[in-house]
Image (cartoon, grey):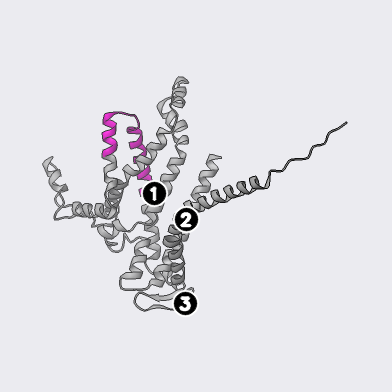
Amino acid sequence: MAVTTTPSTPPAPVARTARSRSRARAGAGWLYAAPTAVFVVVFFLVPTLLVLQMSVSDWGLFNGNQGLNLPDNFTAAVSQTLFWPAVRFTLLYTVITTVILLALALGLALLVQESGRWNSVLRTAFLLPSALGLASASLLFYALYSPQASPVPGLLALVGIDVGPISFLGTPGAALASTVVLVVWRFAGFYMLLLLVGLQGIPGEVYEAARMDGARPLQIFRLITVPLLRSSLALCTILCVTGSLLAFDQFYILTKGGPDNSTVTIVQLVYNAAFQGQNDLGRAAALSIIVLGALVVLNVLQFRGLRGKEN
């Protein structure tokens, strides 16, 4: 004779207690997320909505919102004389800075990845410039590049090289190179630290197995280190590209966009539109929206490329 059983249901008090615990966990989760949500809303969402409103309005620095004028701000921003030269220069600066920074940071990380007293000293020395603000570092290098106060000619004269005053910022090429030197000095240690964390996350057994199989150092670097470091390299690339596209402080302090507007960046155009003579917040906001859209598209492409390579 078959015996049938019916599924037992928990008593009502037990069910209510489980639901209460679930609601308490959900409430705790919302409570933990609330500070971040408030921060994002106040410091990102609200300013972004305000910039969007400005970009479609006739909004002056002193007279406020004078009504909608879409798409006048965007057409005026794109059609100004310095827009495309600024875009080309910003892209050139981004490519040069990203390549040099990543190569140097990876080399420094490989140099100091082993534990040791001297490697600890080198890590600290390489990382120290990152503790200095970019504006402060730019002022320091502005004095270093000054024809009147620069110590470089005097140091070269001590070793028998008399070159006289050096025009570090006098030509477009020299101004770009001098600014790249500043940025590399300031950020190489920071990216070295990110890559060093990635290097230390690679198991040592992988290197030992490769050496036992007869792999040479270059093969180990190309076939093991670089593939396993791809996530860290991608993070550094995204940070470096984003920071370079938004470059402003270093060029504003060192070159003011000169000589002959050859070092004007796209963010400097935003500043000029808002505060330098034009006082047009609407056009500045339109330029900001264009830059934001370009950054979003570029970061999405980088993330997709990284995901495809990992797959």
Residue under label 3, please give it.
69
| Mark count | 3
Residue 83 counted in the magenta span: no
On the image, the x and y values in percent for residue 205 come to 45, 25
Amino acid of disc 2: Ala
On the image, the x and y values in percent for residue 60 come to 37, 76
- The numbered mark, 1 or 3, whose residue comes first in the sequence reads 3
Residue under label 1, please give it.
240
Q: Nearer the viewer, mark 2 or mark 1?
A: 2
Amino acid of disc 1: Cys
CB atoms at circles 3 and 2 under 8 Å apart?
no
Q: Nearer the viewer, residue 174 or 274?
A: 274
- The numbered mark, 3 or 2, whose residue comes first in the sequence reads 2
Residue at horizontal 34%, vertical 40%?
104
Say which quarter of the image contains residue 82: bottom left
Residue 108 counted in the magenta span: yes
Residue at horizontal 24%, vertical 54%?
136
Label 3 and label 2: CA atoms lie apart by 37 Å
Name the disc covering residue 216, or none. none
